Image: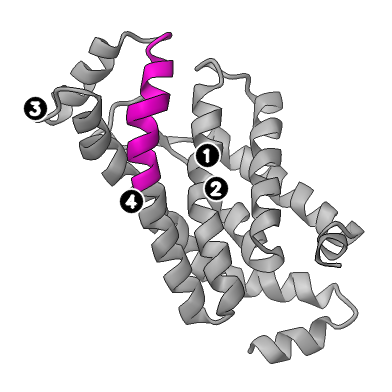
């Protein structure tokens, strides 16, 4: 019943719309040169994903993440051998899944804030481990690992290997990204949620209950 409810026409359309919007946002990246080298760019693509996750659940969030990456590849082909897109999908899921699960259990403003805080920390931790063990070794096929480490060391001399790079550059980068995404989501979610629920026959009742 829950699966059929997720895959109704309205939700499929919403997942496609949120995924397409997220893909457009994924194309535009803002470098944070004081935190990480220029090949790390901050994008706001997790905002539509989080909104969709809070509205339709964690599984819908994963679907939106996947749609986002696929549409982005149509808009702008990969320049990293799909490493960047894989990282964006994996680390995005590491944020939206805990956030979505917590909000699903506690559908209040407090639940959303706690969920996004936990999701942000989760993304930072998974980003550190994932970059050190998987993403950076894969990316070294396109840029020598020594060059990557040197780019990090130019920002912080304490960086000397993949783990220090991941901890000092990737960790804070993802914390900043998670904070920015969470802040904007908190500001826009209520208005978007009202529009989504008002399109449902019982929407007015749902909005009143959430208020």
Sequence order check, earlier mark of 2 and 4 = 2
Local secondary structure at mark 4: helix
Residue nearer the viewer, 27 or 12: 12
Residue at figure coordinates x 55%, y 82% from the top left: 108
Which of the 4 quarters of the picture holds residue 197? bottom right
Q: Mark 2 vs mark 3: give the one in front.
A: 2
| Residue at numbered disc 3 | 157
Please determine whether, in this image, residue 143 is positioned above or below residue 45.
above
Whether residue 80 is visible to the viewer of this picture, yes or no, is yes
Residue linked to disc 2 = 93
The residue to which callout 4 is attached is 175
For image coordinates 9% across by 30% down, the residue present is 158
If the image is split into quadrants, where does the C terminus sit? bottom right
Report, in whole angstroms, how far the alpha carbon at label 4 lies from the one at label 3: 21 Å
Residues marked 2 and 3 touching at CB (< 8 Å): no
Q: Marks 2 and 1, Cα distance to the nearest angstrom?
A: 5 Å
Mark 1 = which residue?
90
63 vs 136, left or right, is right
The percent coordinates of residue 113 (x first, y second) are: 44, 72
Crowding around mark 4 (Cα neighbors within 10 Å: few <14, some 14 to 19, many 20+) is many
Residue 135 point in image, percent of width and height: 42, 25
For the residue labelled by badge 2, is the local secondary structure a helix, a strand or a loop? helix
Q: How far apart are marks 3 and 1 (CA)?
A: 29 Å
């Amino acid at each position: 019943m829950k699966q059929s409810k997720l895959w109704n026409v309205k939700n499929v359309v919403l997942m496609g719309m949120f995924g397409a919007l997220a893909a457009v946002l994924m194309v535009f990246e803002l470098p944070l040169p004081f935190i990480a080298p220029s090949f790390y760019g901050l994008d706001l693509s997790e905002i539509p994903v989080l909104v969709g996750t809070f509205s339709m659940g964690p599984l819908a969030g994963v679907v939106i993440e996947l749609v986002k990456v696929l549409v982005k590849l149509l808009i702008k082909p990969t320049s990293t051998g799909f490493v960047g897109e894989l990282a964006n999908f994996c680390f995005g899921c590491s944020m939206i899944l805990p956030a979505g699960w917590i909000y699903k259990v506690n559908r209040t403003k407090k639940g959303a804030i706690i969920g996004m805080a936990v999701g942000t920390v989760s993304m930072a931790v998974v980003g550190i481990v994932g970059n050190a063990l998987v993403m950076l070794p894969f990316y070294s096929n396109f840029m020598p690992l020594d060059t990557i480490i040197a780019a990090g060391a130019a920002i912080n001399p304490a960086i000397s290997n993949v783990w220090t790079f991941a901890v000092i550059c990737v960790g804070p980068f993802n914390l900043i990204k998670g904070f920015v995404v969470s802040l904007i989501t908190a500001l826009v979610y209520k208005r978007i949620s009202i529009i989504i629920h008002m399109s449902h026959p019982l929407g007015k009742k749902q909005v009143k209950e959430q208020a």
